[in-house]
Amino acid sequence: MGEAETGPCFSATPRSLKVARFLIDECLHTSLVELAHAAGHAADHVTYLGLGSTKDWQLMDTVLERDYTFVTNNRSDFLALYNRAPLHAGLVIIVPNVAPPRQRELFQAALEHIGQGEIVNAILEVEYVDGRIECREYPLPPA
C-alpha cells in the first residue's frame, strides 16, 4: 500500500492552507459536521443531502464529482472504491464503529492531523491503540 505514517495525530508534513470539504457518511453521527465547521472546513452529512441508503458506488460518484474528503467507518468497501479512483480528495476512516462521543474524539484528532491542508490521494485511518488515538496516513492508489 505504499509508505504509511503512523503515530500521534499531528501532521509532520507541512500542508498548504486550504479548506477541506468533508462528506460524513450516514454510519457516523451528524455532530461531526459541526466539528469540521469549527475547524474552519466545509462539511455535509449524507443524510442532510438526502443520500441516505445510497449504494456505496453511487455515493462514491457524488464524492468524486463534488471533490469531497469522505469520512466513514466502512473501511473495506471504501478502500476498494478509492483504490480505483486515480484522483480523489482523500478518505478518513474512523476505526472501529464506536459511539458518537468517541467518533467526535477520533474525528477531532483527524482534523488536527489534517490541519488547514488536504489529503489528496491519501487515506487517513484514525483509531484507539493502547488507550491513545493514533493516525495512519498512506497514499491510495499507491504511488
Image: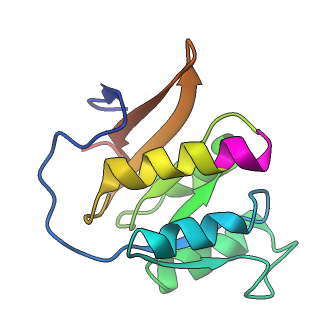
The correct choice, above or below, for 77 with respect to 117 in the image is above
Decide which of 109, 142 is in the foreground and name it.
109
Quadrant showing the C terminus: top left
Residue 127, horizontal then vertical, whole percent: 56, 31
**Could you tell me which residue is drawn at 36 percent across and 51 percent down?**
112
Inspect the magenta stretch and tell me whether residue 102 lies in it.
yes
The correct choice, above or below, for 82 with respect to 46 in the image is above
Residue 26, horizontal then vertical, whole percent: 78, 65
Using residue 40 as the reference point, say whether residue 57 is left or right of it: right
The magenta region covers: 98-103
The correct choice, above or below, for 29 with respect to 127 in the image is below
Q: Residue furthest right?
A: 53
Quadrant showing the N terminus: top left
Q: How is the image coloured?
A: rainbow
Q: Residue furthest top?
A: 130
**Could you tell me which residue is drawn at 39 percent across and 67 percent down?**
88
User: Which secondary structure dominates the residues rendered in magenta?
Assistant: helix
Please indicate, yes or no, whether residue 126 appears anywhere in the rendered image. Answer: yes
Please indicate, yes or no, whether residue 93 appears anywhere in the rendered image. Answer: no
Inspect the magenta stretch and tell me whether residue 24 lies in it.
no
Using residue 135 as the reference point, say whether residue 36 is left or right of it: right
Residue 48, horizontal then vertical, whole percent: 75, 85
